[in-house]
Amino acid sequence: FWAHRGGTGGNFGIVTSLTYNLHKLKEVWPIYVDWPIEDAATIMKTWQDQMTKDLQYRDLGILGFLTTREVPDCIDEQGRRQTKFEQYFAIRGIYSGESAEDGKKALAPLIEATDSAVYPRGSLWVKQYPYAYMNEHLLDNVEGVIPDTIKETKRCALIERALSLEDYQTMVNYFC
């Protein structure tokens, strides 16, 4: 058994059969929330301090990121249209719990951290969607909006300590 588990450091066995137990996927509540870049550090710090320590809401799956979008209808002093971009902090995700009320409680620390949350797809907690649909469309209004002239950095790492508000602000400043 030791060799089958990789104990020899080499290839010892070949898997010839594998069985999966599949479960029917639930419908989920979509989450689309944006904040002005000025609130990004506060939102990330709140997320760290109030939502990741005890993982109370295991049905909540969210992804947060700093991004940018084109500001529509920007006109300069001479009346010419100009392209202008604004940075913002976005959260996209799903809540797979049964009730909208429980979803609101799960997301409340972030929504209540500032008074500037914006809902680009309209109100939250209106309708559930099939998981497969949401998995495919979750980033529809975000992907591809980063202009070619702006650096895009993606990196994940284990952080050995809790970050301070100043640490998060340093990340935001680097992005801006």
Image (cartoon, rainbow, N blue to C red):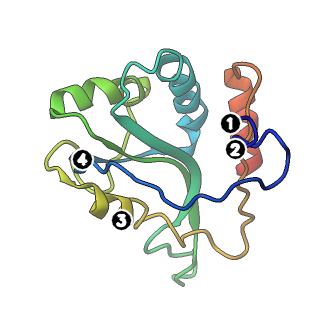
Q: Residue 146: which quarter of the image?
A: bottom right
Q: Name the outermost residue toward the right.
A: 9
- Where is mark 4, residue-wise? 28
Residue 61 point in image, percent of width and height: 41, 39
Amino acid under disc 4 = Val
Q: Secondary structure at mark 4?
A: strand
**Which label lies toward us, 2 or 3?**
2
- Where is mark 3, residue-wise? 137
Query: How dense is the environment of label 1, judged by Cα within 10 Å: few (below 14), some, or many (20 and up)?
Result: few
C-alpha separation, residue under disc 1 versus residue under disc 2: 5 Å
> Is 66 rendered above or below residue 47?
below
- Where is mark 1, residue-wise? 1
The residue under the point 23% across, 53% down is: 122
Residue 5 point in image, percent of width and height: 70, 40
| Residue 17 relative to residue 126: left or right | right
C-beta proximity under 8 Å, tags 4 and 1? no
